[in-house]
Amino acid sequence: SQTIHQWPATLVQPVGSPLSLECTVEGTSNPNLYWYRQAAGRGLQLLFYSVGIGQISSEVPQNLSASRPQDRQFILSSKKLLLSDSGFYLCAWSVEFSEVREQYFGPGTRLTVT
Amino acid sequence: GQNIDQPTEMTATEGAIVQINCTYQTSGFNGLFWYQQHAGEAPTFLSYNVLDGLEEKGRFSSFLSRSKGYSYLLLKELQMKDSASYLCAVTDSNYQLIWGAGTKLIIKP
């Protein structure tokens, strides 16, 4: 069966500090991978998605970046965090070439920028 | 532009029935999803509709009308554990998921 891991679960970082969130998927090959952010009481905002190693599409211009160094690893980074980067960060995956494209979510990382 | 509308919040009574509506305007349509999200947790898949009609899954049912750009999620025999946010999402012509802001459902005893 497939599982998706994210860490850390919670993170408190000062403004201007760097960020690295990691997501890994097990039990599937060549998944589509996604990074979302959810502000408190709001919907999901797609930040990045990837259809393969080294292939990253950005949906929202901002100070965040993403990388996919391995097939089942997706990393979200920032060089300098802003207060507005606070939120609940969710990684998700979906099956490649599936018409349904149901997305499966990791447990999320709650980031507070102080 | 692409837009998905859902009510922000709804309140219902334990044991009752509630219908959560979703209307959408997207560039193409390749299916509609409903997800449940409990506070502080990740969304979990509830249902998928790609053809018009009603899909029933236990206490939950989801309806789709593609011509009207409309869907609803019907929850029967409400339980306190059904208190959560319900997210509507549509797959557009590029197979990208467009998400609604979610409906917070409050269940009262």
Image: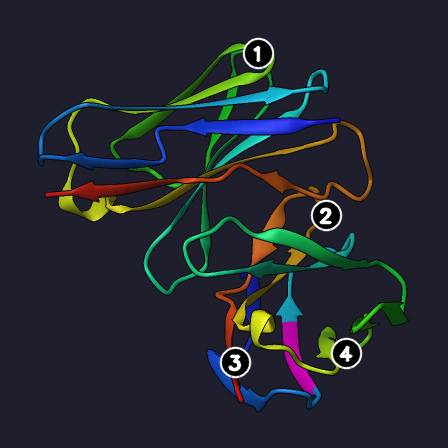
All told, the count of numbered labels is: 4
Q: Which residue is mark 1?
A: A53
Graded by Cα atoms within 10 Å as few (under 14), some (14 to 19) or many (20 or more), the crowding at tag 3 reads some
Tag in front: 1 or 2: 1
Q: Residue furthest top?
A: A70
Residue B7: which disc? 3
Give the CA distance from mark 1 to mark 3.
38 Å
Graded by Cα atoms within 10 Å as few (under 14), some (14 to 19) or many (20 or more), the crowding at tag 2 reads few
Compared to residue B6, the image places residue B18 above or below, namely: below
Pointer 1 chain: A
Compared to residue B57, the image places residue B12 above or below, namely: below
Coloration mode: rainbow
The residue drawn where x is 45% and y is 59% is A43
User: Left or right: A77 with respect to A89?
Assistant: left
Graded by Cα atoms within 10 Å as few (under 14), some (14 to 19) or many (20 or more), the crowding at tag 4 reads few
Stretch of the chain drawn in magenta: B18-23
Residue nearer the viewer, A3 or B21:
A3
Residue A108: which disc? none
Amino acid, disc 3: Pro
Residue A19: image x %, image y %?
24, 25
Pointer 4 chain: B
User: Left or right: A58 with respect to B89?
Assistant: left
Q: Which residue is mark 2?
A: B93
Q: Secondary structure at mark 3?
A: loop
The residue drawn where x is 53% and y is 61% is B1
